[in-house]
Image (cartoon, helix red, strand yellow):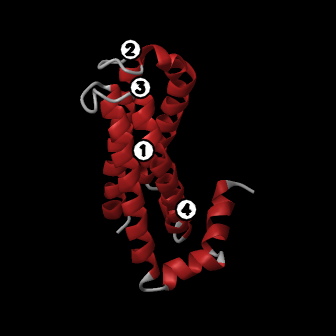
């Protein structure tokens, strides 16, 4: 089964039909999606700004991460679930939409950047945990992260104009 076959099949799933046809379901799901995405971007920004040495300079990087990342992951799960429900309601159109594809690309790059940070820079965090300015690799990862999440927000908003 190719994606071209998968998208119409997904659109016919009972939950997708409900999202598409119910007058209030789509806006409610979209509202939860936006709120969850806001929490993701906000909490990621807290960590990224600390890594850039622009905020919370007196706090250990590990402490900042430990305090906000559980919220980040919970919000990300909720954003992914609601995003999938929204996508399923018109999968064929979303899959061909340039802003949607750019948003997915930005999410993919953000994820790859996070993995690279975790497996490269963060392995030595004990050495620079309390430093006001972490190493260049950590600061670079934070800058890429912020750029990706800004792109996710911009493209997400753009989707609302490109599909209507």
Residue depicted at x 44% and y 53%: 100
Task: Please report whichever mark, 2 or 1, sits nearer to the chain's N-terminal start.
Answer: 1
Q: Mark 2: which secondary structure?
A: loop
In percent of width and height, residue 39 lies at 38, 54
Residue corresponding to mark 3: 141
Alpha-carbon span between mark 3 and mark 1: 18 Å
Mark 3: few/some/many CA within 10 Å (<14, 14-19, 20+): many
Residue corresponding to mark 4: 81
Residue depicted at x 49% and y 52%: 76
Q: Nearer the viewer, mark 3 or mark 1?
A: 1
In percent of width and height, residue 46 lies at 33, 39
Quarter of the figure that contains the C terminus: bottom left
Alpha-carbon span between mark 4 and mark 3: 26 Å
Task: Please report whichever mark, 2 or 4, sits nearer to the chain's N-terminal start.
Answer: 4
Q: Mark 1: which secondary structure?
A: helix
Residue corresponding to mark 2: 135
Residue depicted at x 37% and y 36%: 47
Instruction: Say which of 79 and 148 sits in front.
Output: 79
Quarter of the figure that contains the N terminus: bottom right
Instruction: Please count the marks in the image.
Output: 4
Alpha-carbon span between mark 2 and mark 3: 10 Å
Residue 150 vs residue 112: left or right? left
Q: Nearer the viewer, mark 2 or mark 1?
A: 1
Q: Are marks 2 and 1 in contact (CB under 8 Å)?
A: no
The circle on residue 68 is: 1
Q: Is residue 2 above or below residue 140?
A: below
Alpha-carbon span between mark 2 and mark 1: 21 Å
Residue 7 vs residue 128: left or right? right
Q: Are marks 3 and 1 in contact (CB under 8 Å)?
A: no
Q: Are marks 2 and 3 in contact (CB under 8 Å)?
A: no
Asked where in the image residue 81 lies, by quadrant, the reply is: bottom right
In percent of width and height, residue 115 lies at 55, 30
């Amino acid at each position: 089964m190719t994606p071209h076959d998968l998208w119409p099949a997904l659109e016919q799933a009972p939950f997708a039909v409900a999202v598409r046809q119910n007058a209030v379901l789509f806006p409610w799901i979209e509202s939860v999606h936006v709120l969850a995405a806001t929490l993701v971007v906000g909490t990621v920004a807290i960590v990224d700004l600390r890594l850039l040495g622009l905020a919370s300079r007196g706090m250990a990087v590990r402490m900042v991460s430990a305090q906000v990342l559980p919220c980040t992951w919970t919000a990300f799960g909720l954003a992914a679930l609601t995003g999938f429900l929204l996508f399923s309601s018109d999968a064929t159109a979303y899959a061909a939409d340039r802003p949607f594809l750019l948003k997915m690309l930005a999410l993919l790059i953000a994820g790859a950047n996070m993995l690279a940070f975790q497996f490269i820079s963060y392995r030595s965090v004990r050495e620079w945990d309390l430093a006001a300015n972490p190493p260049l690799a950590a600061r670079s990862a934070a800058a890429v992260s912020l750029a990706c999440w800004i792109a996710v927000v911009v493209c997400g908003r753009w989707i609302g104009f490109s599909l209507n």
